[in-house]
Amino acid sequence: MANTLKTTKRWVKVFEDEEFISLLTKSVTDYMLTTRWYAAKGQNTKNFKITLRTPLGTEKKTLAHAIVIEVNFAAGFTEYYFMTLAFCSEEIDKKGIVTKASVGGKQGYIIDAVYWEEFRKFLFLAMTKQKKFESDGRTLLFEKGKVLRSSTEYVSSQVLGFDQSNTSLEYNDKYYLKIYRRLFEDVNPDLELTRYLSDDAGFKNAPSYVGSMSWKNRNYSVISLGLMQGKIDNRGEAWTIMLDDVKAYFDRVASTKTSVKDIENIPLFERRRIKELDDEIVDLVGFQTLKNVQKIATRIAEMHIALFKNRYDTAFNPTSFNSDYSVWLKNRIIYQFTARHILVEQNIDKLKGLAQEYAQLFLNARDEITRKFLEFEESLLNSQRIRIHGDLHLGQILASDNNDFYIIDFEGEPESTIRDRKVKQTPLKDVAGVLRSFHYAVYAVIFSKKFKSSLTEDELFQAGEKYYQCIVSVFLHTYLDTAMSSNMDVGYYPEIVYLLKYHLLEKAVYEIGYELKSRPDWAIIPLTGIKQILDN
C-alpha cells in the first residue's frame, strides 16, 4: 500500500488542501485499476481528475464525499466514474481501502465508502427521507418509489460480490441498491425503465422500483448515481437452466438411440403450439422446457405491451419507422461490423479448426453482410418502434421457484452511448436477443470441454439446430399471440421475419467482439450463429 497521505485539514475540509487532493487522486486512480467496475484498464490514459464533489452526512458530521473521477484518454475521449470516499480511523474492509491517511491529526484509512456499514445505513435512510444535498449549484437528490412510502427501518446491509460494471448493495435481505460506477449526463435507462414498469405500468415481472439517487444541475441535466430495486427470490438465470436443458436433450437423443435425421425438422420462424409438435420431439426437448419457453415469451411480450401502451410520455410513446432512424441504425451497425471484421482479421491466426474455418467464411461474406445491413428500408415497415430492454438475453432473465420468470438489468448494450440506448426500436430486437441466446446455449454445450456425448459432432450440430428451431417455433407463437391479442403493432408476418433476421445478424456480429476480447475459445459460437443466419 502507498505511503500515508497527510493533511492538517479536518475531513470536511480536505478538498481545500490541493496538495493532499493531488496525492489522493493518484491513490484513487491506483484503487480504480484494481476494481472490476473500471472497464478501461487496457486503454492508454492521459490523466485522472476529481471534477465534482458533494459532501454527504449530517449537519454535525461529514460521513463521505461523493466524487466524480474524470478519465481522459490518449485517443481523445473521456469517461466519468463515481465513488464515495470516507475516512475511518479503523480498518473496515480491506477490499475497500484506498490509502492510509492522516487527516486532521487522526490516523486511519480513506476508503470506498460503500464498504462501511455506517455509510450504507446513511444511504438507505437518506432514500427513505428523500434527502437533498446542495453543492456548487448541484443537488444530490435521493428519491423513493411506492415501495418506500411507508416508513421502513434499516436492519442490515452488505456489499455483494458479483459486481462488474456496477456495485450492488443488499439491504434488509429485500432490496438491492445498484451503484452506477460509470456515469453519463442523462437519466440511466435502467432507472427510467424500472421506475416506469414498476410504478406506472404495474408490470410485475421486473424488479420493483424502490428508490434512486441522482445529481441534478441548475440546467436541469441529470446524472444517475444509483437505483434501488426490490429483491427477486430466484433459483438462477434462465441461461443456466437452458444449458442444463440442452445437455439433457442431447443425453436423451443418445440414450434412446434416436436417429437425428428422423427428429422433426421445423422450418426456422415457423410458429407452433406445443400440441402441434411431434410427440417425439416434445419428449426429447422436454415438456417442462417448452413450458418454460412459453412463459419466458409471455413475460417478454407483456413487458413490451406495457411499454407500447404509454401514450402520454414522449420518452416512451410508440413511434413509426422513419429515415432518421434508418440512417442512425445503418451508421451504427456498419461501424460496429467494420470494427468486428478488422478484429477477426487480426485474430484469425489465433483461432483453430472449425473456428478458423467459420472466421474465414465471415471475412469472405463481408460484401453480403454489408448489403444485408444497408438494405434496411423504413418505407416497407408498417410496425412501430418503442423503448425496449436493449440487451435482452437469457442471462437477464431470472427464474423463480414457481417456474415464473423475471426480466432484469435495463441498462442496454454496454458499448452503446446512453442516448443510443434510449432510441426507440422494434421490440423484435429484444426477441432476436433471446433467440440468439437460445442458439448460444446449444453451441455453448456442444463446444464445452466438459461435455461428453456418444453423438458425433455432425450429429450434435444437426440435433442442436432441430432443438433450436423447435424452441424458436414455440417462443414465437407464444410471443406473437400474446402481443397481437393486446393490439401491439409488430407488423405482418413477412415484416416480423425480416426484422428478426436483421437483428439476429446484428446480435451475432456484436457477440464476436465480446468473445474475441474476453474468451477467444467461445468465438466459434457467434461465428456458427452467423453461418446459420447466412445459410437461412
Image: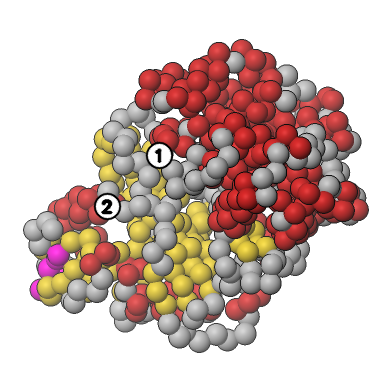
Q: Which residues are magenta?
A: 100-105
Residue type (three-letter) at the residue carrying disc 1: Ser
Whether residue 285 appears in magenta in the rendering, the answer is no
Instruction: Say which residue appears at 60% left-offset and 78% top-offset.
Output: 148
Within the image, what quadrant is residue 320 found in? top right
Q: On the image, numbered disc 2 is attached to which residue?
A: 34
The colouring scheme, among rainbow, by chain, secondary structure or one colour, is secondary structure
Whether residue 101 appears in magenta in the rendering, the answer is yes
For the residue labelled by badge 2, is the local secondary structure a helix, a strand or a loop? loop
Of residue 462 and residue 235, the one placed in the foreground of this image is 462
The reply, left or right, for residue 133 in relation to residue 320 is: left
Instruction: Say which residue appears at 83% left-offset and 38% top-offset.
Output: 270
Q: On the image, numbered disc 1 is attached to which residue?
A: 518
Where residue 164 appears, as percent x and y from the top left, is 42, 54
Where residue 525 appears, as percent x and y from the top left, is 53, 35
Indicate which disc, 2 or 1, sits on the residue closer to the N terminus. 2
Within the image, what quadrant is residue 370 found in? top right
Residue type (three-letter) at the residue carrying disc 2: Thr
The reply, left or right, for residue 72 in relation to residue 287 is: left
Within the image, what quadrant is residue 190 found in? bottom right
Residue 92 appears in the picture as rendered: yes
Instruction: Say which residue appears at 8% left-offset and 58% top-offset.
Output: 3
Residue 396 appears in the picture as rendered: no
For the residue labelled by badge 1, is the local secondary structure a helix, a strand or a loop? helix
Mark 2 or 1: in front is 1
Crowd rating for badge 1 (residues with CA inside 10 Å; few <14, some 14–19, many 20+): few
Crowd rating for badge 2 (residues with CA inside 10 Å; few <14, some 14–19, many 20+): few
